[in-house]
Image (cartoon, rainbow, N blue to C red):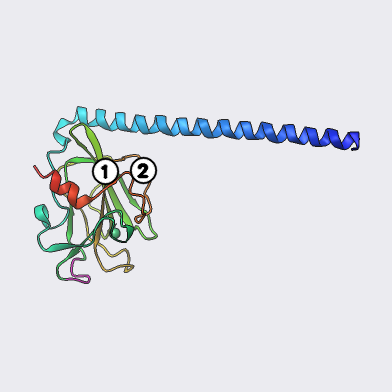
Amino acid sequence: MNKFLFLIITFLLILSCKKDIKSAQKVNNKTEEITIEKNNLKTNYKSLFKKNPEYVSNGFDFPVGKPDAKGYYNAQKFKENNHLGDDWNGLGGGNSDLGDTIFAISNGYISEVKNYKGGWGNLVRIIHLKNNKLYESLYAHCNKILVLEKQFIKKGEEIATIGNNNGQYMAHLHLEVRDAVHLDIGPGYSSDTTGYLDPTQFIKNNRE
Ligand SMILES: [Zn+2]
């Protein structure tokens, strides 16, 4: 082999190895950062509730037809078609429930109010603390939002009205309950339910 060519190849090999090591370090640092952020988030929420103990959860109710979902049915249950939440619809069907009130399922802290557009539309997320564990409830496709983010809320208070995401669906409330409070908005549907709970089952188990 040409000596010069050999030198070039060796040089390129060394360069690519170095790059691999560097990117591996970068990934490790990033994972570490995310873990630290998640822990901070949990600590911050817990200390927030510690300073405002009247907003610690005193049990959970249903988000429509309060407190028992009277006049409503769950049209698409958790895990049905890989659904990550419940779809609450009025018994009248169609858009008969458009504009009906959505209630906070428990005391908590409103962590986010946002129009995510796409398939999500207007959305409210609430953080709850129960038995020293954090949960999150998420209310999607809302017509009107009646609350501001970074505020505390009491169980049964109005947070929004049922919408149809600008006619994309028949009006309904998509409700999720999560036991991971650091998750992104998420896909709405997935066979992987890590971090998600069956909302109806969770509410039934935590009525008080
Ligand atoms: Zn849904």
Residue 43 on image: x %, y %: 30, 28
Left/right placement of residue 194 relative to residue 20 reads left
**Magenta region, main secondary structure:** loop
Residues under numbered marks 2 and 1 in contact, where contact means CB atoms less than 8 Å apart: yes
Please name the residue shown 17% across and 61% down the image.
100
Task: Determine the quadrant in which ligand 1 lies.
Answer: bottom left
Q: Which quarter of the figure is the C terminus placed in?
A: top left
**Over which residues does the magenta segment extend?**
93-97
Please name the residue shown 16% across and 44% down the image.
106
Say if 169 sits above or below 207 in the image. below
Location of residue 77 (image quadrant): bottom left
Residue 47 on image: x %, y %: 25, 28
Residue 161 on image: x %, y %: 21, 58
The residue tagged with tag 1: helix, strand or loop? strand
The CA span between labels 2 and 1 is 10 Å
The residue carrying pointer 2 sits among few (fewer than 14), some (14 to 19) or many (20 or more) residues within 10 Å by Cα, namely few
Q: Which mark is residue 136?
A: 1
**Amino acid tagged 1:** Glu
Query: Would residue 60 be visible to someone looking at this image?
Result: no
Left/right placement of residue 148 relative to residue 58 reads right
Residue placed under numbered mark 2 in the picture: 183
Residue 91 on image: x %, y %: 14, 68
